[in-house]
Amino acid sequence: MKKKRYHLSPNLRIITDPASELAMIYHTLYGNPRIVNEEGLRFLSIFRQPITANEISEFCDGDPNDIIKEFAEVYFIVEPEFDEKKFLQDKKNQQLIQTRRRMTVDRMGLAISDSCNFGCTHCIHFQPMTSSHQALPIHQSSHSQFNMTWETAKRCVDQYITLMKEQRKSHGKIHFGNAEPLVNWPVAEQVLKYCNAIEDFSFEFSINTNLALMTRQIAEKFKKYQVRIATSLDGTQQANDAIRITKDGRGTYARILEKFDLLAEIDYPLDGFSTTVTESNFEFIDTDIIDLAIERKMTSIAFDYDLVGLIHVPIEKRITKLMRLKKYANEHGIDFFGTWDSPFRNLTSESLLFGEHAFCAAVQGKALEFNVNGSIKICGHTTTTIGHIDNFDGIFKEDSGLMQIITSRFPGTDKYCFGCEIEGPCGGQCHVTREVDSRLVSKERQKLFTDMCNFYRMTTESLALEYIRSNGTVATVNRQNCIF
Ligand code: SF4
Ligand code: SF4
């Protein structure tokens, strides 16, 4: 039988850490990182030319077959005739088939209202449409169209339940999001009551709210229906009040903390909050916001830089701050995460070799966000519609907007990303950045996208170095004893 020859995949990436003398190796499309020592790197270097296991055995004491098998399974080494393009096309086809069979969606969002009681200028829902800062069309609707009606909400929920039942599921996830859902609380409450009364189906509910309109009565309802609350506090007073403001420009810090206290009083305390950092509060953000979370016995902070507007702060400065805050938070038992660590989280937790994969659940076709008027998107922050509740089945047709997004965002498809060191785990990054970017004039456009790419690549490398130092000693590939 012909012996298999292997050589290094051209998509193998090595991040070395001189301090620990260890390295992380991973496939730029399929991930599966491994920590290796110098000996492991020397072993890999044998594969610079195609070689068989027998040929390697001649200068190794042990049997190299296990480690060759392990590296071949994750495509660190490949046979010279391996056709990566075809392999990726097959994987993409599998994902598209699953989507067409209506098997991928597992959660829904209800854009319960398009209006908001706050006036934060950085809000992702009010991103500029062009460089002249024209607002997005959704916010140009007449006042009566700002809130979702109960009839629309019910139709969306019923459709979602039908879809989940087709997948033989008896549990679903509903998220109330968009601008400020509590502006339209009566409809949100009606949805909660309605869903709760369904006997053969259970739900997990979540809501994104700025909390300002939350009365004690609403808070009690959140507790009753176990609604997971995602809220924002953009730093301690000075940092928060620099950007999170009322329509007449007043700070919101004191008001938000009052609501934190109210939730604690009714024994339904928050376990964390989100912090957004823009150019205007960047300098005011520090570990004091983490101290606030520690004092309140919280366990997580979702921390994000403005996805489209922080290019004036140098990337190195952004990453240094992120890593310092993350270290401080982790040392105090606080999970500290955000869109910035998505490529690294993807790299270390999933791979398109073993399942579906994309930058986030939305781009993967797992989420349906129903707009106020019944139109449908992949995520509450995006503006691209993929269909309408009036023609729900159309979403899963071959030429639908959903199929187009999955097709164009699948790793190995976007020419701009070819050869990128995080091509698979990043998968073309957040769809919102792409949308805003596509609306900018060409010079600004290039700048924003390049900045975000460099930011993701450098953040992933910093997180990899941190990972090597904290996990390296237990995970080192050091099983060969070869003479090189
Ligand atoms: S969007 Fe940028 S960082 Fe992400 S895969 Fe493409 S080139 Fe790489
Ligand atoms: S597209 Fe962007 S904003 Fe939407 S879910 Fe994905 S990462 Fe989040």
Image (cartoon, rainbow, N blue to C red):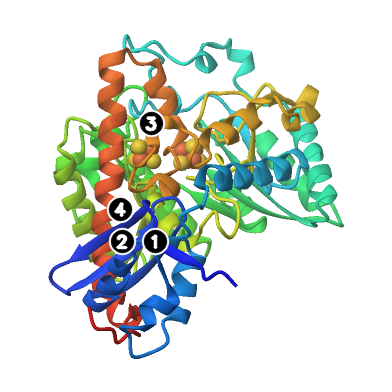
Query: At label 2, which amino acid type do we have?
Result: Arg
**Disc 1 versus disc 2: distance between alpha carbons?**
6 Å
Rounded to the nearest angstrom, the CA distance separating label 1 from label 3 is: 26 Å
Mark 3 crowd level (few <14, some 14–19, many ≥20, 10 Å Cα): few
Distance in Å between CA atoms under marks 3 and 2: 27 Å
Secondary element at image label 3: helix
Q: Does 420 sit left or right of 194 as displayed?
A: left
> Label 4 vs label 3: CA separation?
19 Å
- Residue 455: x and y in percent read 26, 42
Quadrant assignment for the C terminus = bottom left
Position of the N terminus by quadrant:
bottom right
Circles 1, 2 touching at the beta carbon (< 8 Å): yes
Query: In the figure, residue 23 lies in which quadrant?
Result: bottom left
Q: Which mark is residue 460?
A: 4
Residue picked out by circle 3: 416
Can residue 213 be seen in this snapshot?
no
Whichever of callouts 1 and 3 sits on the residue coming sooner in the sequence is 1
Q: For marks 3 and 2, give the one nearer the viewer.
A: 2
For this view, does 304 lie left or right of residue 193? Answer: left
Residue 348 vs 436, above or below: the answer is: below
